[in-house]
Image (cartoon, rainbow, N blue to C red):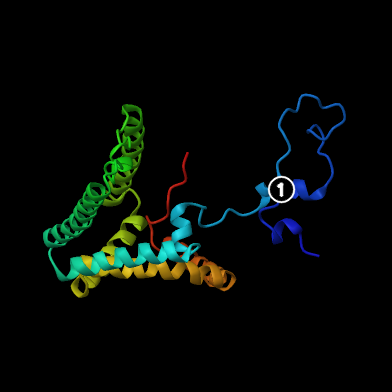
Amino acid sequence: MADPAAQFPFVSSSSSSGQPQPGGCGGAGSASCADPPASSSSSQPVSLFAASPVHDLLFWRDVKKTGLVFGASLLLLLSLAAFSAVSVVAHLALALLSVTISLRVYKAVVQAVQKSEEGHPFRAYLELDLTLSPETFQAHATTVALHLNRALRFLLRLFLVEDLVDSLKLAVVMWLLTSVGAIFNGITLLILAELLAFTLPPLYEKYKVQIDHYVGIARRQTKDLVAKIQAKLPGLAKKKPE
């Protein structure tokens, strides 16, 4: 019979044996072990998509909300593809002002006729506290600076050829993007990206087992191919960290 640890890589061999290890927390009288036992959920693989509002949108958990966001964003991108950005922003502002001014005048007329004191129709929104505190701004600025430093360091490694294989991969990707850029413009790519973002996650969730199987095969073949290239060409093998 095959080793359970080989079939289920998320379960360690020590935990599957069920026997206490000598000198470990399972020994008799081992009061010095203060670590709590690992929960059963720790042995499960982590999901590719974490639960979040974006996750719910992309997986169509709420069809009405996702349809509204998808339709509005797609209409905006199509408008930007047909008209200039200034024209699109101006028309959106005019449409919003038309709605708010009409509602404001309508409420004022109704209050004048009924002699009521309902007040401003948007009073609740006008009184919202939208002030950004210095602590919140500093926290977001720190996070942005951290990601920016990592991105700059990563780009520095690629363009200064710290690892030849990674730099060659970047060169191939950039060469492919030149062909893509000759066919599509930026707005068209954004439209295609949105269509894929709202269609691929539900398909992945429905055919997860089959997709993971073929993706795993492709990853193994790519890894083997890169290893063969590194073995045949001198100077391409990555140096082991000391």
Q: Residue at x 66, y 56 (%)?
A: 9
Which of these two is toward me, 54 or 44? 54
Q: Residue 180, image x and y in percent?
A: 24, 71
Q: Residues within 10 Å of mark 1 (few under 14, many from 20)?
A: few
Which of these two is toward me, 175 or 18? 18
- Give the position of the N terminus as an image quadrant: bottom right
Vertical arrangement, residue 22 with respect to residue 14, above or below: above
Q: Secondary structure at mark 1?
A: helix
Q: Residue furthest right?
A: 28
Q: Is residue 112 visible?
A: yes
**Residue type, mark 1 in image:** Ser
Q: Residue at x 83, y 47 (%)?
A: 18
Q: Residue 219, image x and y in percent?
A: 50, 66
Q: Residue 31, image x and y in percent?
A: 80, 25
Q: Is residue 195 left or right of residue 84?
A: right
Residue on which disc 1 sits: 40
Which of these two is toward me, 38 or 172? 38
Vertical arrangement, residue 199 with respect to residue 141, above or below: below
Q: Is residue 165 left or right of residue 10?
A: left
Q: Residue 187, image x and y in percent?
A: 22, 66
